[in-house]
Image (cartoon, rainbow, N blue to C red):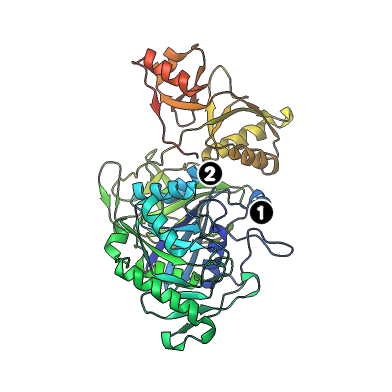
Amino acid sequence: MPDARPRRTFAVISHPDAGKSTLTEALALHARAINEAGAVHGKGARRATVSDWMAMEKARGISITSAALQFVYRDHVVNLVDTPGHSDFSEDTYRVLSAVDSAVMLVDAGKGLEPQTLKLFRVCALRGIPVITVINKWDRPGLSALGLMDLIQEKIGLRPTPLTWPVGEAGDFRGVLDRRTGDFVKYTRTAGGATRAPEVRLAPGEVDEADAQVWSDAVEEHELLGLDEADHDQDGFLAGRTTPVMFASALQNFGVAQLLDLLLDLAPAPGATEGVDGTVRRVEDDFSAFVFKVQSGMNSAHRDRLAYARVVSGTFERGMVVTHAATGRPFATKFAQAVFGRETTSVETAEPGDIIGLVNANALRVGDTIYTGDPVEYPPVPTFAPEHFVTASAGDIGRYKQFRRGIEQLDQEGVVQVLRSDLRGDQNPVLAAVGPMQFEVVEDRMTHEFNAPIRFSRLDFQLARRTDAAGAEALAGMRGVEVLQRSDGTHLALFVDQWRAKVTARDNPDILLEALPAGGG
């Protein structure tokens, strides 16, 4: 039977070190999906977060790949996706944003709006994704609350509409003023924030003397916000004109319960989705889904490969035969999983908004559509412009087969772009990346997951332009440029610098040289 419970599907996004993975863990803790939260930078016996499962993530304390968690809260099914914050992995974050209905933007109270934060806000605006802003780390010294509201208004152009307001300045977090009810939600610290933080809801007349002054300051600022008409507007939020704001400390589990409730109450449910040909698929129509991520190596006991798919319409039933839009061929979904970090469990059915993992679906690539009934194909995820290039070769020639298989797998996952040419041959593919940390991931995974040591040789190219077969022929042999072909068939002309690209385009106006979407920085 279809599961009629409402769905909420959202991503947690931010600049690196703003606390995304910690918040992800805290949300799961408050939903009682887990019993104890770890910290990304945990020490001693404290474990890594559920969403950061790769060895390199645990060692560095950063998110390298997106991770999906599904749990139930207040009779809603919640699909939460944690994303990498570092700009080197912005392609992965962009893929996730193609598969969610809303986003939670985390802002570090001490650092304000950092470059990646601004960029992600713009991406959400371009995709029409409503954003809830969480001012995190309020338990540490930081900027003023009113100053942060001004920054959001000035730098992003979104009208901040706080739903909670901090009681106590940054570094002295007593709790929040619930602007919808006027109550004081007071928090009590727990050891290391590993368990749910107790909270007490007090009416204004019940605030004790120890909190009287900071409560009075919060009330005064709340009234100023009201006079400035900085109150929540649901239509404005859904239209991307305003952003509800909350104050929290994810590490201490302060404000997390309010965020969960807010997501259920205000974030949009799954809705109709438009295909590339303009046809609209409603949630109640025949089944369709969109693959936004491919991941292998989640289970070290055997060679697994999981295609993450967002259900767009209809009811998914395990074992159903669907059509692969890219090839028109039937595809059997015998093995389907619900995902919680790296842990998976068999799933029998899934509804629009749910994220399912299709096991060993070797035919599926990022951006593919699967469906039943009337044909549909959803827009592909754009590939960003690479700015860093290396040649790759097997560190151990006796393990060339493993080398070749590993490169193919990482290419399919989108860890890097793999470029080839007849001149270079298959033994020395060119790896292209938005940021250099992607090469570190390749080296780590090739060594430990595929048992195929790899050697890199840096290339002097700095940018790429899309061209075609005619352009590839015309550019052959030109100084400072090399044309290679990506695995999806796209021809990329690599240039040693911006000047060379401009001169080549100026002197050869008939050659196609098209800029790709920028992903880094």
Tell me what residue is drawn at x 58 percent, y 66 percent.
251
How far apart in space, not on screen, are marks 2 and 1 (Cα)? 17 Å
Tell me what residue is drawn at x 53 percent, y 44 percent.
89
Q: Secondary structure at mark 1?
A: helix
Q: Position of residue 24 (x, y in %)?
A: 53, 62
Q: Earlier in the sequence, mark 2 or mark 1?
A: 1
Q: Indicate left or right for 170 with 229 as reference.
A: right
Q: Is residue 2 visible?
A: no
Quadrant in the rendering for residue 429: top right
Residue 58: assigned label: 1
Tell me what residue is drawn at x 58 percent, y 51 percent.
63
Q: Position of residue 417 (x, y in %)?
A: 52, 34
- Nearer to the camera, 368 or 158: 158
Residue 352: assigned label: none
- Nearer to the camera, 398 or 453: 453
**What residue is pinned by disc 2?**
89
Tell me what residue is drawn at x 62 percent, y 32 percent.
404
Q: Residues within 10 Å of mark 2 (few under 14, many from 20)?
A: many
Quadrant of the image for the N terminus? bottom left
Q: Amino acid at mark 2?
A: Phe
Q: Is residue 231 visible?
A: yes
Q: Amino acid at mark 1?
A: Lys
Q: Residues within 10 Å of mark 1 (few under 14, many from 20)?
A: some
